[in-house]
Image (cartoon, helix red, strand yellow):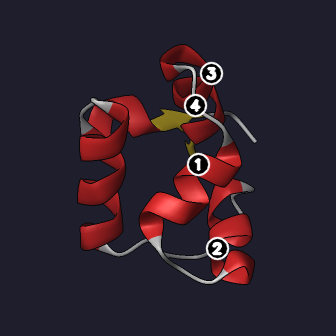
């Protein structure tokens, strides 16, 4: 299973979930689903914005788990 690993990147960059929520400008419900890996898809523009905000690549955003 592929999971979004944003919480680790936020901690690494000294940022909070609230900071990221404000930067992305999406609804809190959609943001929370995305952060908690409860969504089926993520838009490319959101991946790009996450990479720019967190100074990372798409490879850094995702991890593969054995669930």
Q: Is residue 5 visible?
A: no
Number of marks present in the image shown: 4
What SS does tag 4 mark?
Answer: loop
- Pointer 1 local density, CA inside 10 Å: few below 14, some 14–19, many at least 20: few
Task: Decide which of tag 3 and tag 1 comes sooner along the chain.
Answer: 3
Q: Which residue is mark 4?
A: 15
Question: In the rendered image, which residue does mark 3 sit on?
Answer: 11
Q: Secondary structure at mark 3?
A: helix
Q: Quadrant of residue 33?
A: bottom right
Query: Would you place residue 50 above or below residue 24 in this image?
Result: above
Q: In the picture, which quadrant includes the C terminus?
A: top right
Neighbor class of circle 4 (other Cα within 10 Å; few <14, some 14-19, many 20+) is: some
Pointer 4 with pointer 1, Cβ within 8 A: yes
Q: Point out the frontmost of discs 4 and 3.
A: 4
Q: CA distance from mark 2 to mark 3?
A: 22 Å
**Which numbered mark, 2 or 4, is in the foreground of this view?**
4
User: At x 58% / y 48%, what residue is drawn?
Assistant: 19
Q: Are marks 4 and 3 in contact (CB under 8 Å)?
A: no
**CB of mark 1 within 8 Å of CB of mark 2?**
no
Q: What secondary structure is found at the residue carrying circle 1? A: helix
Q: Nearer the viewer, mark 1 or mark 2?
A: 1
Q: Dot 2 corresponds to which residue?
A: 39
Dot 3, how many residues are within 10 Å of its Cα: few (below 14), some (14-19), or many (20+)? few
Q: Residue at the spot x=63%, y=70% of the render?
A: 31
Front-lying residue, 13 or 34:
13
Give the CA distance from mark 4 to mark 1: 6 Å
> Is 2 on the left or on the right of 32, as rendered?
left
Q: Which residue is mark 1?
A: 19
First in sequence: mark 2 vs mark 3:
3
Separation (CA) of disc 3 from disc 1: 12 Å
């Amino acid at each position: 299973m592929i999971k979004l690993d944003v919480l680790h990147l936020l901690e690494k960059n000294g940022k909070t979930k609230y900071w990221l929520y404000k930067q992305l400008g999406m609804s809190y419900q959609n943001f929370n689903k995305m952060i908690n890996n409860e969504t089926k898809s993520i838009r490319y523009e959101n991946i790009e914005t996450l990479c720019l905000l967190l100074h990372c690549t798409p490879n850094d955003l995702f991890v593969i788990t054995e669930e």
